[in-house]
Amino acid sequence: MLPILAGFECGRLGWNGHDLLLTTRHVPGDRMAAHYRLAAEHGLTKARDGLPWRHDTARRLQTAEALGADVIWDLSHFDPPDDPVGHARSVAQAARQDRPLWICPVNEPSIYPMLAGMGWEDAVRLAVTMIRVAKDHHPDIRVLTCDPLNGIGERQFAATDALVATGLVDMVGVNYYPHTARTVLSKVLVKTARRYRLPILVAETSWHDGHREQMRRYPGWNKGDWLRHVLSEAAVAGAKGADLKGVCWYPIVDSPPWDRPGSRSRWSHGLIRQDLGLDPHLAAALAERREPSGQFSFGYASNG
């Protein structure tokens, strides 16, 4: 059964300082452990999360470790570190040395010009720097790229092309949302798999209740419908040879609107609500494919 990952929003927005780890309370000592437990209870036994430089990365690693969680960790999610060498080194040294450490060095480098004030070429160089430093200080670094791949046109692949060309990448992430999709997901996954000849992860996808473009394209749908659709498209891509390793629902926790970090309202795009209640449609879709164990097991992280 194709694994589903719980994705935890870990970005910081430069124009207003909105730190989504803080506004979703996904931090040690607050709700980080509760979020992981709720995800695991609903069959989400793998995760993608963040180790941003403004936070205590060692404590975040320790919290996940105490829960038995294997996680793909973002090192820069729209917030380039002041000292990328020091950041990558500290993360690598704080992580367990007896198993692989999966990192996504830079989330969505192709849109860093818009969200981080950094050209995508510079974002790629930042990613390569942090990968190389992490490899110098950890015996087994594994690397995920992720970028918005919503169609099959050439321009969208530029940043991923540059990263894969370094020979440092282990898995390619496809970020695909219903409101920006230009091509059906199965075709995007097959095109990506054939282009890079690497394992593929749907690194981000979700459904945002109330989003006008999503409602226009898929009238009457809900989060459960979208998850079933994504898994169906993934199965089609797998049958055509794509080595697909999982689907990450991103984000799994409802967050405040990006431009209103102090708002009491939340964007309804996750499983876990502000009061730790659950979205019934997504919970039902997850229950249909519940894995037999609630333990975290990031299986492909330990393969050679």
Image: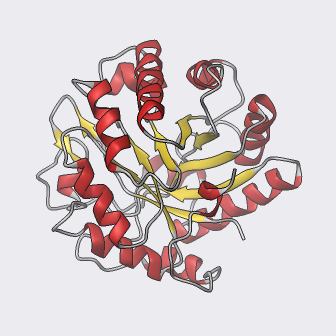
Rendered-image quadrant of the N terminus: bottom right
Q: At 62% across and 57% down in the image, what residue appears?
A: 302
Q: Which residue corresponds to the image point at 45% horizontal and 30% vertical from the top-left? A: 136
Q: Position of residue 190 (x, y in %)?
A: 79, 41
Q: Name the residue furthest left.
A: 262
Residue 300 in the image: x percent, y percent? 65, 57
Residue 154 visible in the displayed image: yes
Residue 153: percent from the left, percent from the top?
Answer: 70, 23
Q: Position of residue 171 (x, y in %)?
A: 64, 41
In the picture shown, does residue 205 fall above or below 11? below
The answer to whether residue 106 shows anywhere in this view is: no
Q: Residue furthest right?
A: 240
Q: Is residue 207 above or below residue 296?
A: above
In this view of the protein, which residue sits in the foreground, 84 or 14?
84
On screen, 108 above or below 139?
above
Taking 75 as reference, is 214 left or right? right
Number of on-image labels: 0
Relative height, residue 176 to residue 88 (above, below): below
For this view, does 193 lie left or right of residue 128? right
Q: Quadrant of residue 238?
A: bottom right
What residue sits 51% from the left and 79% below the top?
295
Q: On the rendered structure, is 226 left or right of 274? A: right
